[in-house]
Amino acid sequence: MKRFLSLFLAFLIAVGVLSTSMLSIDVSATTEADLTFQLTESGSSYYVSACNRNAGGYVNIPAYYNGLPVTEIGESAFEGCAFITGVTIPDTVTVIGSYAFKDCGALSDIYIPDSVNEIGRLVVAGTDYFNKDSNWQNGVLYCGKHLLHMHPEFMGSYRIKEGTKTIAWDAFSQCILLTSVTIPNSVTYIGCDAFHSCDELKTVTLPKYITEIESGLFAYCISLIDITIPDTVTRIGECAFLGCSGLETLDMSRNIKIIESSAFVSCVELFAINIKDIANWCQVAFDGTGSNPLYYAQNLYVDGYKTTNVTIPEGVTEIKPRAFEGCKTLSSVYLPSSLRIIGEYAFSECSKLISVTYGHSELKWNTLIIKTGNSKLTSSNRVYTYGNSANTKNLTLIDDVWYYTPNGNIDYSYTGLTDYNGGYYYVSNGVLDWSYTGLAQFYG
């Protein structure tokens, strides 16, 4: 009978006959038995995956279950629990999934602890907490140190509160009259699609300590003109800047490692990419053409200066696929002797590339692994910094190593300088040493 009554009341609330505030029934607190727990992928903790939809009253999520911490509240875990009035979230929880408490109509008492570092979309939509005007601050809904939502009618610029830790997924999505946002450095996480389709958004100040630009973060922000990616960022997610048709300049993180598919698709006005570390740029994993902003910008800036000449520093052993794809202003490149592999399309569509300087011999050049899509490298004029052995007085190239051979035989006892194509170079125990930078004696 009680189950029938609960279901009947839930139906009345759903169709609008009753509001949760009209109920005066005595509902006992939800117990642990009403919750469903599942192991996380790591197997080292649990997450709450569901709650009995007939449960009511106050929910106390346990910090531990079966001896392991409860670290997550899963997507839609409490969605539609119409009789829950409050919830206590332990500080073991770090993730709250999308729609976690959506449509918990009576839920008015909730506090998200500081331990939470990732929040999905619409976690409290359709709750009493969401619907109560007093919980909104100038059109923005916070819960603890977490920004959950902005009213879509918000107009103008906004400065997020100091001390805010996370910004939920979709928090500012489709706020079409929002023009600028300042985000304090206390923010360490900004959720997927947080600024999706903010049509009038022109400027955003990103915090110093975020590590990722999440998927769809600024997608279709058509008025966004420039953006600086903090050096703490190592990944730019899928479609992060998709359709940002007004984006002109991008200052890239010096520590970027991954740029996912379609991250910069349709950024048709992009003309300047500033890269701070060429060696790191050579190691970035690009997921397809639309992931590399250089393909659209065509212009490369290094430390703020436009350049048509790129020097890949010694120590780089591989240039990853698509690293300089579409950089049409690139005219010359220096490739170091340490280089072993040039990935697919690394220099594809570099239409003005006419000069390649390689820091070793032609013999070693022929051992390089140059993958498909790099025809400009092989067709451009090449200069080798190692001369042919016939042009040296005392050096002979044997099995890709230069030896000191003043009389036709290798002299392993010699350490010092010798002449080489009009210059003097250091030999250590009979072997040419290009890494030496100190003083040495010259014996001829």
Image (spheres, grey):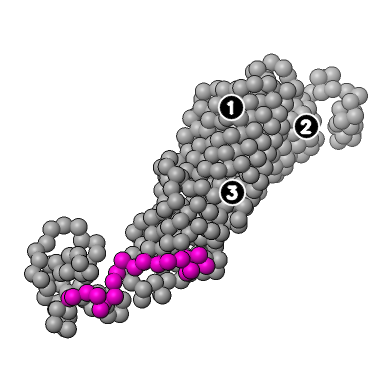
**Crowding near pointer 2: few (<14 within 10 Å), some, many (20+)?**
many
* Residue that carries the numbered disc 1 in the rendered image: 181
Quarter of the image holding residue 437? bottom left
Quarter of the image holding residue 58? top right
- Judging from the image, what secondary structure is the residue with disc 3 in? helix
- Of the two numbered discs 3 and 1 on the same chain, state the one appearing first in sequence: 1
Q: CA distance from mark 3 to mark 1?
A: 26 Å
**Quadrant for the C terminus in the image:** bottom left
Determine contact: label 3, label 1, CB under 8 Å: no
Determine contact: label 2, label 1, CB under 8 Å: no
- Of the two numbered discs 2 and 3 on the same chain, state the one appearing first in sequence: 2
* Residue that carries the numbered disc 3 in the rendered image: 296
The residue segment tinted magenta is 375-394
Whether residue 141 is visible:
no
- Of the two numbered discs 2 and 1 on the same chain, state the one appearing first in sequence: 2
Left or right? Give the position of 439 relative to 380.
Answer: left
Q: Residue at x 36, y 73 (%)?
A: 362
Residue 285 percent across, percent down from the top left? 52, 56
**Numbered circle sitting on residue 26:** none
76 and 428: which is toward the camera: 428
